[in-house]
Amino acid sequence: MRGKYAKFVMLSPAILVLLATTTYPLIYALIISFRNWKLTKSPEPKEFVGLDNYTQAFDDSGFTNSLQVTFLFTVLSVSLSLGIGLAIALLVQKKSLVNTILKTLLIFPFAVSPTLKGFSWRFMLNADYGLYNKIAKTVFPPAKDIIWLNDTFWAMFGLAMSETWGWAPLIALMFVGALGSISPEITEAARLDGANNFSLFFYITLPLLRPVILIALLLKTIFSLKMFDQVVTMTGGGPGRSTQTFNFFIYQIGFRNLDMGYASALAIMLVIFLSILAYLYVKLLLGKGASA
Amino acid sequence: MFLNHLWGNGGDVFDSAMRPIFNSPAGVEATTTYLDLLKKGYSSPDAVTFNEGEAGTQFATGKSAMWAGWSWYYSNFNNPKNIAPEVVNNVGVVTAPAWAGKAPITYSQIWPVGISKYSKNQDAAWEYLQWLTNTRVEREVVLNKSDAKFDNVVAVHYPILQDPEVNKLHQNLQNTILNVLKTARTEPLIPEWPQVESILEIAINNMAGGKPVQATLDQAAKDVDGIMKKAGYYK
């Protein structure tokens, strides 16, 4: 009996910290989302306004714009991260000294803070003295007049690449683990049946990687939907509003327009959507573990 | 810079009833002239992505001949540590340019100091404020050039701004500040300003990227109109 309750006692400090830093602010944000609170007008939340803060979003062109931007960004960064990650994994999967060193290096980009990634990429994409700028314009002279961060397409692409740069190597590591678990007997049997590299990849490797692909897809999607740091340090939401992701839009409403009620409502919307995805992620992860 | 052009040409963001009027003919002319700085090649093309720091850097590295901005940047541009050698001690100051035959109307901001009504040390705070805004102390600070890192050129008292010794040390910077302050204006001091400013910024960025001036300003005016109506300034 003592043993049964001991684990709750052990966990309680961590649970208290969690409650204080995430659950309490979340519930408070939920309460504020139903009230009128503009910091420019009062230091405290004012009257109850029901769902007004939520319905306000659907009249706001900034809201619809940020949904489109976030969707575009998510599609771009998820496909790039998974595609490049898979390519890297296939390249380093064979056992060799070089590959062991490379696999160790793969974790470093993910460890770089997103804010720093944004600043670095902003420097490297500078149309005057940026590194990527010089490389691109040397390799492709017709590009010499492009101001990368002022072009709707390139700013979004640059944003997606700064995120992919950090995530693709991590996803590659996930795939490396999964590739390693594919029994060599399967590949041998396939080759005996006359499979070439192409069909081996598409009919054996990819289907066996499906669980990991799904998990990586869901995880990356969750993170892409809340993209914020690089928007602040790299593009500022620009050019115009073309890189204003949803999380950045919430930040502008809350900390620039100082409309806390509206910002809380938007944030709760994001939380609900992400929670659904997170639930699917955990179900997928635990389901996989249970069947393994 | 946008506001300088707008105000100098007789235009404004709002009229007396707080309706947006920056898309008036004066406003369109001001915006077009402002964007011509970019389109006619007076600024480098990548200036469209610059924030204040990056613009300052371009001037500090000797790539730009002129820089329009805050008076206190003068200290930055004369610090030999980060500035190109041909720029250090080679920086002059003038009043911001104006439309032909009209006075410059520049955009100013101030940093207020105050005592919190919740403070438990209001007397000590008051004593501190008296020291902080003391004219003798201010003069000493402005004249102190012993360390470029702590250089300060800003004075807030008329006697110091007109002081001949202070001006001699800074190529007449303080007299220029004084002259500019006579016709300077602040942004509209309303709670909705951050939202309005955001709309204007996005519109200007879009126009700098090539969108048509009149149409973009009209749409921005429509958006601002929506904000002002919702805030209750008019029906």
Image: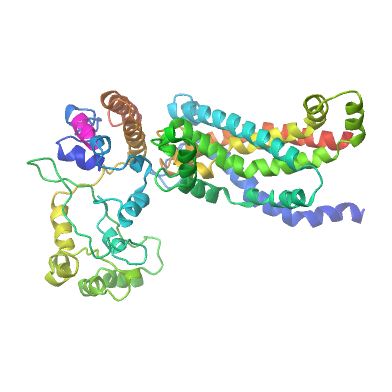
Q: Please provide percent x and percent y for residue A270.
A: 58, 34
Q: Position of residue A84 (x, y in %)?
A: 66, 36
Residue A134 spot, x, y in % from top left: 46, 44
The answer to whether any part of residue A278 appears in the image is no
Horizontal and vertical percent position of residue B178: 15, 58
- The range drawn in magenta is B27-34
Outermost residue, left side? B101
Kindly identify the residue that appears in the image at 42 percent across and 40 percent down: A38
In depth, the one of B212 and B193 nearer the eye is B212
At horizontal 29% and vertical 23% (from top left) the residue drawn is B215
Tell me which secondary structure the magenta stretch mostly adopts: helix
Q: Nearer the viewer, residue B180 or B57?
A: B57
Left or right of A279 on screen, residue B201: left
The vertical placement of B171 against B107, above or below, is below
Quadrant occupied by the C terminus of chain A: top right
Q: Is residue B48 left or right of residue A3?
A: left
Q: Is residue A35 visible?
A: yes
The color scheme shown is rainbow
Q: Is residue A206 magenta?
A: no
The image shows residue A280, relative to residue A110, as above or below, that is: above
In this view, the residue in front, A144 or B182, is A144
Q: Tell me where residue B70 sits by quadrant.
A: bottom left
* Residue A264 in the figure: left or right of residue A110: left
In the rendered image, the vertical position of residue A184 relative to residue B140, given as above or below: above
* Count of marks overlaid on the render: 0
